[in-house]
Image (spheres, helix red, strand yellow):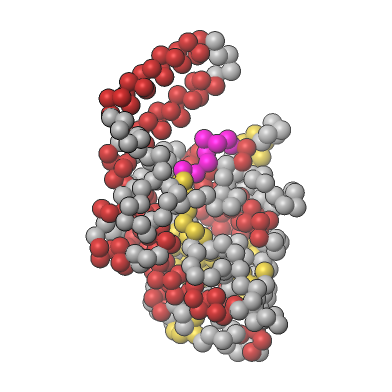
Amino acid sequence: MLWQPGGPSHLDMWDMKPDAPVEYRGEFTSIPSDIPGYRVSELMPKLSQMCNKLAILRSVHHMMNEHSQATHTVLTGYAPVKGDPVQEAPSVGSIVGKELGWRAGLPGYIAVQQALEHGRSGYLGVANDPFETFGYPTSPSFRVRNLKAADGIKDERVTTRKKMLEKFDTVRRDADASGAIGAMDEFRRQAFELATSPQIQEAFDLNKESDKTRERFDKKSGSGQGALLARRLVERGARFVTVSMTFAKPWDSHQDNFTAHRQNVPGYDYTASALLEDLANRGLLESTLVIIGGEFGRTPRINDKAGRDHWASCYTTVLAGGGVKPGIILGSSDALAELPKDRPIFHQDIMATMYHLLGVDYTKSYLNEAGRPVQVLNYGKPIEEIL
């Protein structure tokens, strides 16, 4: 998941309106894509020639126009009950990680650098939170925090400590009626494997990539190197990885929208195209679902500060690979990009599509903190046109 926090402008990227009045259409011109008749922003020359690999959904919508509420809705499928929400429901990554589990020694759910807002496990418990890499992937000395034993602690000392813990827990387990110690066994085994496996250390090591590959993902860009790390992790077994696509300016462009997008979109174009190109070249795109977007779009009408405000009523989300039919432009907005014109798509439909493609039963229920069953998704269905 390449996440654009703050909300990118659909009108200035994927849903251009060249015939709209100037106070709507904005400053950018459009360029042709490799799909006949479909045009995208001039700021996306690389992605314009990769549209035949994408499913571009231009009529996505929900009801939340505030960042935190919208993010909670888009990452969990549930609108928050509270005005300023905590993590009221598990994020998509937590669900996928819980259902599909660890693979090849890697956590099922990994957040490059840090977890997204509302990207945690909620009532599923901390064992289903993302494994966070922290650090700065652009640094030549980048290493994942707590992934190795402390300096000076040799392998035999680590093993000795592990055996001591196991002996100590044997005493406590005999007196543990709740089963909590037993539940910790798997958690500890996974942590020990993370901290001692050379194969896992290698998965997180960007220095194993060639200079040419690292440059294609922009060595100076945290988002670019984060996307490269995400590819390494998925290639080696991770189930779900998030990368925050942040660049020079916030996507939340209430003022100087065109300055912000002029500085952000070229980096986005470079990074997203690099990931798609790399996955395709390695034969991984067909088995790897890529989801690109933010929590909403921007207001079609430009405000008096040359900005665009929050707009959840109609925006664009892009999917690729992993069983998604390529070269699809689904749904459209009206003449001013304010509302869906045809084929409205709830964001929960995108989530249902993702769960369906990953083999996760989105009708399944978990018990929340109150002991009540809550479905993974309580509405939304797979988007048949792109399967």
What residue is shown at x 53% (from left), y 41% (from top)? 129
Vertical arrangement, residue 218 with respect to residue 174, above or below: below
Report if residue 65 is visible in the image. Answer: yes
In this view of the protein, can residue 277 be seen by the observer? no
Q: Is residue 234 left or right of residue 25?
A: left
Q: Write the residue at 67% across / 80% down.
A: 305
In reply to whether residue 128 is colored magenta, the answer given is: yes
- For residue 190, which quarter of the picture? top left
Q: Nearer the viewer, residue 26 or 284?
A: 26
Query: Residue at position x 49%, y 70% from top?
Result: 248
- Residue 17, given in percent of the width and then of the height, sits at 59, 84
Residue 287, located in which quarter of the rendered image? bottom left
Of 380 and 217, the residue lying toward us: 217
Horizontally, residue 203 falls left or right of residue 362, namely left
Question: In the image, is residue 87 above or below residue 266?
Answer: above
- 315 or 38, nearer to the observer: 315
Where does the magenta region start and end? 124-131
